[in-house]
């Protein structure tokens, strides 16, 4: 029995395999427990293995690649088109096996352990920031029940704390709200610790430092992109990279007429959010961006947030150029006027 291609439907404990031979005939349908995976593929001759780029996919890709197999990861929504009728583990594995052999299929580069370690810092920071926001919103809403209304934003949290030192809220409510404020302080401290670790990694990585020279791209954005994008040359152009981040307009074109709508919001939402926030910061604080004629033209016609999204799109294309071509960022020089 010669196996040319195997589709693996990943799970927590039970994995479904679907294998075909060189002629495309089905030669394998099997379930494996997690503990059986490495032993099974160690005995198998080298073949093409397809998997969806989901949780634990990069781990298994590294492990099976070490055994000599060729691993290809695919976005799950690209595999969906090859699923026939009902959905189950066997049907999913068959669809993966079919999709991995398509010549037009797009694949996901396998991340290294170091890249995933950096992403652990970013995912943890994102979780802590969300928890801080939840706690702050809870404190604000509870104080509103006693007529306290202050400006929104973490920077104005001190005004809310001041009311905990007065008799605005009677006991025992004031004591409990003080515990909530202490929790926010602890979250702030942990976020600072994660930020310090991210900054230390950024200073030790040359690619991340090159990206941080782009206006609006700081250590947080640069390190997240370097850790997420294992190989920028997987994307054929800067526009394809920007589309992967969901920063390009959604198209509904037909009959030679172009109809562009809002951005697609597809791809990595975390990096897209960071880029848009970085673009908003650049619009407010960067002299280079403020003096850019393209940006000034957009600001005269559109709202600032829409301009920030357009600038984030441009930033993504610049980032791709620096990563794919190994170039450095050079600020645009002003054209002298006569």
Image (cartoon, helix red, strand yellow):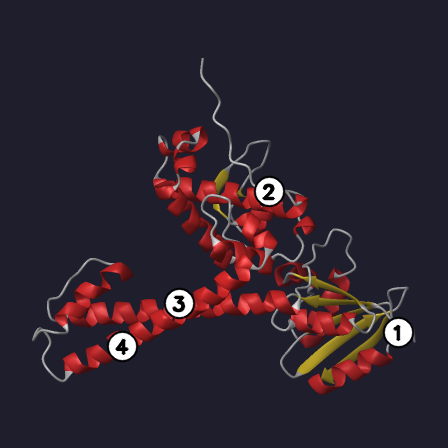
Q: Residue at x 39, y 67 (%)?
A: 192
In the rendered image, residue 6, in percent from the top left (x then y), is placed at 79, 70
- Up/down of 178 relative to 271, above or below: below
Q: In which quarter of the image is the N terminus?
A: bottom right
In the rendered image, residue 226, in percent from the top left (x then y), is placed at 59, 56
- Up/down of 135 relative to 268, above or below: below
Foreground label between 1 and 4: 4
Residues tagged 2 and 4 counted as in contact (Cβ below 8 A): no
Tell me how far mark 3 sits from mark 4, CA to CA: 15 Å
Tell me how far mark 3 sits from mark 2, CA to CA: 29 Å
Tell me how far mark 1 sits from mark 2, CA to CA: 44 Å
Tell me how far mark 1 sits from mark 3, CA to CA: 49 Å
Tell me how far mark 1 sits from mark 4, CA to CA: 58 Å
Tell me how far mark 2 sits from mark 4, CA to CA: 44 Å
In the rendered image, residue 209, in percent from the top left (x then y), is placed at 55, 52
Q: Is residue 79 visible?
A: yes
Q: Mark 4 points at which residue?
A: 182
Q: Which residue is drawn at 79% across and 78% down?
A: 29
Q: Provide the secondary structure element on which disc 4 rests.
A: helix
The foreground one among 2 and 245 is 245
Q: Provide the secondary structure element on which disc 1 rests.
A: loop
How dense is the environment of label 2, judged by Cα within 10 Å: few (below 14), some, or many (20 and up)? some
Earlier-in-chain disc, 1 versus 4: 1
Q: Name the residue under label 3.
A: 192
Q: Name the residue under label 2.
A: 328
Earlier-in-chain disc, 2 versus 4: 4
How dense is the environment of label 3, judged by Cα within 10 Å: few (below 14), some, or many (20 and up)? few
Earlier-in-chain disc, 3 versus 4: 4
Residues tagged 1 and 4 counted as in contact (Cβ below 8 A): no
């Amino acid at each position: 029995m010669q196996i040319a291609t195997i589709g693996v439907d990943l799970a927590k404990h039970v994995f479904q395999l679907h294998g075909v031979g060189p002629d495309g005939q089905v030669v394998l349908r099997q379930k494996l427990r997690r503990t059986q995976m490495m032993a099974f593929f160690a005995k198998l001759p080298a073949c093409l293995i397809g998997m969806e780029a989901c949780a634990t996919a990069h781990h298994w890709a590294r492990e099976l690649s070490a055994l000599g197999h060729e691993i290809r990861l695919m976005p799950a929504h690209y595999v969906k088109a090859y699923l026939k009728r009902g959905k189950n583990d066997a049907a999913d594995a068959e669809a993966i096996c079919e999709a991995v052999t398509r010549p037009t299929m797009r694949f996901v580069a396998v991340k290294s352990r170091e890249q995933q370690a950096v992403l652990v810092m970013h995912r943890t920071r994102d979780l802590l920031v969300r928890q801080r926001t939840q706690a702050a919103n809870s404190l604000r809403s509870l104080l509103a029940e006693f007529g306290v209304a202050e400006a929104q934003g973490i920077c104005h949290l001190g005004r809310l704390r001041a009311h905990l030192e007065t008799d605005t809220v009677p006991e025992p409510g004031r004591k409990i709200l003080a515990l909530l404020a202490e929790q926010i302080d602890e979250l702030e401290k942990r976020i600072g610790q994660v930020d310090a670790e991210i900054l230390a990694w950024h200073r030790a990585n040359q690619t991340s430092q090159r990206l941080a020279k782009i206006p609006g791209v700081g250590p947080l954005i640069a390190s997240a992109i370097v850790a997420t994008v294992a190989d920028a040359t997987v994307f054929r152009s800067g526009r394809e990279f920007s589309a992967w981040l969901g920063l390009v307009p959604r198209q509904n074109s037909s009959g030679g007429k172009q109809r562009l709508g809002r951005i697609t919001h597809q791809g990595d939402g975390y990096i897209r959010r960071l880029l848009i926030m970085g673009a908003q910061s650049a619009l407010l604080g960067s002299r280079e961006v403020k003096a850019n004629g393209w940006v000034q033209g957009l600001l005269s016609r559109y709202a600032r947030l829409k301009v920030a999204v357009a600038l984030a799109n441009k930033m993504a294309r610049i980032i791709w150029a620096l990563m794919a071509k190994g170039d450095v960022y050079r600020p645009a020089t002003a054209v002298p006027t006569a």
